[in-house]
Amino acid sequence: MTVTIYHNPACGTSRNTLAMIRQSGEEPEVIEYLKTPPSRARLVELIKASGLSPREFLREKGTPYAELGLADPKWSDDELIDFMIAHPILINRPIVVTPKGVRLCRPSELVLDLLDNPAQSFVKEDGEAVTRAKD
């Protein structure tokens, strides 16, 4: 299985998601999107494939979201994407791509449905235990 994660190593959710992928036996392609941002076309593909809107892909915390006035509904989807391209920190993370789909993995356990052999249990960095429901 091919797994790609758009990752920020400074983000606990992203680190937990990466650890869950690795615990499943996969070694993903790790793209540190702040160092290597996706192209506009790739970002549009990821958003569309995830089923979310560009607004749902925006990260507010720790970003220029407020100072840019991005909460204002006047911004079109294309304009919001332009802001994410200009300021990659606005792209919420982690985004995981597998043959099973594309997902913004917040919370990190959302990645489990995208993996062939997800672990049945996982302990996050903060000590929270995640147990996968039996199918």
Image (spheres, rainbow, N blue to C red):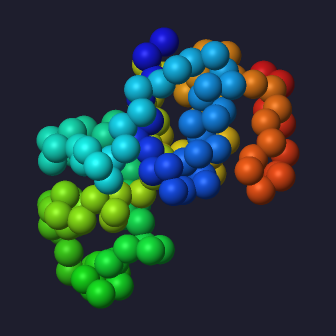
Q: Is 100 located above or below residue 75 in the figure? A: above
Q: Is 50 located above or below residue 132 in the figure? A: below
Q: Is residue 60 left or right of residue 129?
A: left
Residue 50 appears in the figure: no
- Residue occupying the point 25% across, 83% down: 68
Q: Is 73 located above or below residue 94 in the figure? A: below
Q: Is residue 125 left or right of residue 76?
A: right
Residue in front for this viewpoint, 15 or 133: 15
- Residue occupying the point 75% across, 47% down: 124
- Residue occupying the point 21% across, 39% down: 42
Q: Is residue 72 left or right of residue 16?
A: left
Residue found at the very far top of the displayed protein:
1
Q: Could you say which quadrant of the image residue 17 lies in?
A: top right
- Residue occupying the point 83% across, 36% down: 131
Q: Is residue 77 left or right of residue 22?
A: left
Residue 61 in the image, given as x and y percentages of width and height: 47, 74
Residue 29 in the image, given as x and y percentages of width and height: 41, 26
Q: Is 135 located above or below residue 97 in the figure? A: above
